Amino acid sequence: MNRQEIIAYLGADWDRVQALIRDALHSDVGLLEQTNGQILSNSGKLLRPLVSLLVSRSLGTPSEDSVRFAAATELLHNATLLHDDVTDGSAQRRGRPTVAALLGPSAAVLVGDFWLARAVDLIVVAEHRDAAIRVFSRTLTDLAEGEMLQLEKASSADTTEQDYLRIIYCKTASLFTAAAHTAAVSVDAPEPLVRAACAFAEAFGTAFQIKDDILDYAGTDALGKPVGVDLRERKITLPLLGALEGSPRAEEIRSMVRQIPEHPEYCEEIRRFVRERDGIGRAVRSLDAWVDRALRALEAFPEGPARDALAELARYNIWREV
Amino acid sequence: MNRQEIIAYLGADWDRVQALIRDALHSDVGLLEQTNGQILSNSGKLLRPLVSLLVSRSLGTPSEDSVRFAAATELLHNATLLHDDVTDGSAQRRGRPTVAALLGPSAAVLVGDFWLARAVDLIVVAEHRDAAIRVFSRTLTDLAEGEMLQLEKASSADTTEQDYLRIIYCKTASLFTAAAHTAAVSVDAPEPLVRAACAFAEAFGTAFQIKDDILDYAGTDALGKPVGVDLRERKITLPLLGALEGSPRAEEIRSMVRQIPEHPEYCEEIRRFVRERDGIGRAVRSLDAWVDRALRALEAFPEGPARDALAELARYNIWREV
């Protein structure tokens, strides 16, 4: 199934998620209403609510809670994107100017807080609110800790693969895991299936972020996302970590990373180092291992189109030359 | 009772609030732990948890929930301060550099998100969590809407007194109301007393913000808070609104406010206009009316030292020349 077929398969549940998101964001403050509209019109692939609904569909019959949690996941995701655009100073998101760029960081922070508050509002009236609020507030902590750890490591340039995995779990996999976890809870799935859903989502989200980090080295600006950004921000991601592993130049390269703000020209040499040491190839092999892990976790799910669709989404992360 | 006597009166409950805040903020991410420590060491008057505990003490016997909600209120307050410092670009808070100034806006946003997440964590395990989460998430929406409305009005400079009252309710009174509301709920106060607690806190918080806005015109930098900031940010507050009321120059002055970014020198003339039209005197009269309202709401509370202390805090807002 491709994305369109998945959405057709989800049918009315998917429409209810969309409607719930729109309603939740309504505000009589004009600037807010207008900004929310701009964000919604550029809301990307809606991957998190897709995963969420497919999990609840695969493990049971999507309930009102399933729809609420799927919508809340997307609101929470967008809230963190709005805040990330401030922290990264990103001018573009999905090829369009960010709220931070359009209205200034202030608006991006506040709109992000608003989306966050609306997500909580969606969750607190749910039947399974207790479990859901615990899961989502843990994720909110993860997101902040992950970004702070990344910020800290940017200046020291001593990121290890363990740091890297924690960072991408916190900033990406944690929210996918929350989406799958709450989706499973929303249909009262038995504990082993809840754990399987979390295992799938953690591996899926990790693969998703690794692919994103590979694209930052191997992609083209044509994808609407400028390449080379991570390195300019001194973020040491998997392709560089792979290249550094066992290299006699490791310390020299790390100290070049530290000096990138004063010597932006170092980026090109570091990128050459990554290519020469097959950093991308190593990252791709790790990516594929995470995809396998996601697919293995799915084996615990009941057979059916929902499980197939989740597998499809997971395989989508497998590296293909761009 | 002065502040020290109030804290002595609250005794062990107050200590538990402090301890709960410290524990909630622990993180193994060094940069986060260190930043949290800096914020705690400059945490100001802790007015919100004070009001919260005094309300629960006045309406019953403070429970574990009372302590949790008081701590959560302060975490939520600091989270919003961290985000406000980004939106206002403030370099100082309580006479010390802001996190935004020290570590950049990125850190301020993320640390704010972290404090927010920790506040939610404190609430979700409470016995009265359902009511509390509804109240606090409503407040989070208010805070974002209020700041956005303020941002919107800053460019149009057409703020009415009604806009102003909504803005200060959303950005200040809403959180005081949430503190009093959840405190009353935490001791299972009867509905009329819950309403009285909310009425007190709304009037108290409104008076508190009006006084802050008056100080921005009438204060001195000696208070650790630079004066004239609101006008430079084109925030039209009560002293200016009072001066504009019925003035033939109203339109001229508003258009000067709009042009402040290009003509900072207009600020001095506008401030003179406020003085000449007794804008501060009008704002002071309104402030005193809100203080009276807060004191009247307290009449529904049972007599006792806790009620007296709340009255003391309310009277503290009454204008005295600085």
Image (cartoon, coloured by chain):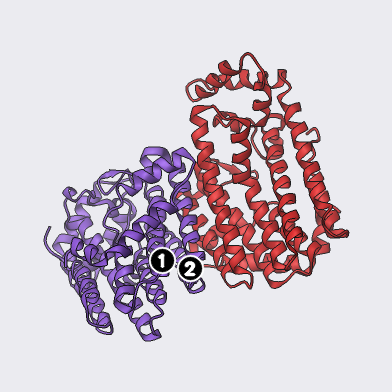
Chain colours: A purple, B red
Q: Is residue A273 above or below residue B227?
A: below
Amino acid under disc 2: Ala
- Towards the viewer: B159 or A251: B159
Mark 1: few, some, or many residues within 10 Å (few <14, many ≥20)?
many
Q: Is residue A128 above or below residue B282?
A: below
User: Where's residue A227, x and y in %?
Assistant: 22, 51
Q: In this view of the protein, can residue B231 be seen by the observer?
A: yes
Tag on residue A69? 1
- Towards the viewer: B186 or A68: A68
User: Where's residue B258, x and y in %?
Assistant: 51, 24
SS of the residue under disc 2 = loop
User: Where's residue A95, x and y in %?
Assistant: 25, 46
In the picture, measured across the screen, residue A118 lies left or right of residue B165, that is: left
Q: In this view of the protein, can residue B89 be seen by the observer?
A: no
Total marks drawn?
2
Q: Residue at x 29, y 46 (%)?
A: A263
Residue at the disc numbered 2: A126
Tag on residue B119? none
Quarter of the image where the C terminus of chain A is located: bottom left
Q: Is residue A288 above or below residue A302?
A: above
User: Where's residue B8, x and y in %?
Assistant: 82, 62
Quarter of the image where the N terminus of chain A is located: bottom left
Residues marked 2 and 1 touching at CB (< 8 Å): yes
Residue found farthest to the front: A12
Q: Residue at x 40, y 50 (%)?
A: A82
Check the residue under mark 1 and report the chain it is in: A
Amino acid under disc 1: Phe
Q: Residue at x 31, y 70 (%)?
A: A161
CA gap between label 2 and label 1 equals 8 Å
